[in-house]
C-alpha cells in the first residue's frame, strides 16, 4: 500500500465578501494570472466572485442568462485560443432534480487595480443534460480540451459509488 504524505497547508487568505455566503468551486483565471473565481453553492444569485490568492475581493460578475439553482463547481479552460469558464449547475443533494445545466462564459477580464468592480457577462453556451440512469449529484467538473469533453464527477451520495461521466 502506497501512502503519500501531503505537505502542510498554509492559509494564504480568507474570502470575505458579504454576498459570498457559501463558496463552492474555485478556478484560476486564464485571462488574469493571480485571479481566482468562486461562487455560492445553492439558491443564490447567478454571480461569480473574483479574488486574489490572498482573498482580496476584486470583482463581482453577474452571469446574464443563467440561473443559480445549485451551482457546485467552476473550471477554467482555454479552447480555440479563447479563455472560458464552465459553471456547473449540477447539485442534487436530495435527488429531486432530473435535469442539469452547464453554463459557459468568457473568462471575464477584471482589473485587480480596481477592486469592488461589478460587471455583467452573458452566457455563451447553455448545455442542458440528463443522466441516462438515475439522477446524480455532480460535485466537480473539468474540461478536456484535447478530446473536447466535459468531465463530471459525482459524489456517490445518490448512487452506489463515485462516477466520472464524459459527454
Image (cartoon, rainbow, N blue to C red):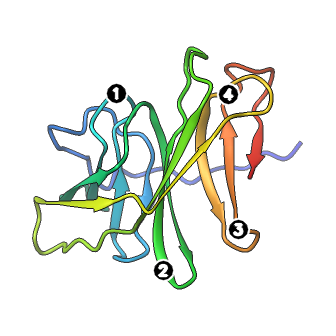
Residue at the image point whose x is 56% and y is 24% from the top = 92
Using the image, determine if residue 7 lies above or below residue 156. below
State the image coordinates of residue 139 (x, y, percent, origin top left): 58, 37
Residue at the image point whose x is 66% and y is 30% from the top = 155
Residue at the image point whose x is 67% and y is 20% from the top = 157
Using the numbered discs, state the Cα–Cα distance from disc 3 to disc 1 in whole angstroms.
30 Å
Residue at which label 4 appears: 136
Is residue 150 found left or right of 68 in the rendered image?
Answer: right
State the image coordinates of residue 11 (x, y, percent, origin top left): 34, 50
Of callouts 3 and 1, the N-terminal one: 1
- The label number, if any, that marks residue 43 in the structure image: 1
Residue at the image point whose x is 53% and y is 42% from the top = 101
Of callouts 4 and 1, the N-terminal one: 1
Is residue 15 found left or right of 37 in the rendered image?
Answer: left
Using the numbered discs, state the Cα–Cα distance from disc 2 to disc 1 in whole angstroms.
30 Å
Give the structural element (helix, strand or loop) at label 1: loop
Give the structural element (helix, strand or loop) at label 2: strand
Amino acid at each position: 500500500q502506497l501512502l503519500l504524505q501531503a505537505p502542510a497547508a498554509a492559509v494564504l487568505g480568507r474570502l470575505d465578501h458579504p454576498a459570498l455566503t457559501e463558496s463552492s468551486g474555485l478556478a484560476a483565471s486564464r485571462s488574469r494570472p493571480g485571479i481566482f473565481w468562486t461562487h455560492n453553492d445553492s439558491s443564490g444569485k447567478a454571480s461569480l466572485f473574483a479574488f486574489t490568492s490572498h482573498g482580496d475581493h476584486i470583482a463581482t460578475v453577474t452571469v446574464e442568462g443563467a440561473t443559480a439553482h445549485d451551482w457546485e463547481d467552476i473550471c477554467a479552460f482555454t479552447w480555440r485560443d479563447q479563455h472560458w469558464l464552465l459553471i456547473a449547475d449540477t447539485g442534487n443533494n436530495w435527488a429531486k432534480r432530473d435535469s442539469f445545466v452547464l453554463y459557459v462564459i468568457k473568462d471575464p477580464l477584471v482589473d485587480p487595480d480596481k477592486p469592488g468592480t461589478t460587471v455583467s457577462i452573458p452566457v455563451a453556451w447553455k448545455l442542458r443534460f440528463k443522466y441516462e440512469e438515475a439522477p446524480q449529484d455532480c460535485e466537480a467538473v473539468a474540461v478536456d480540451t484535447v478530446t473536447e469533453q466535459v468531465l463530471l464527477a459525482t459524489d456517490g451520495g445518490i448512487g452506489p459509488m463515485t462516477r466520472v461521466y464524459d459527454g
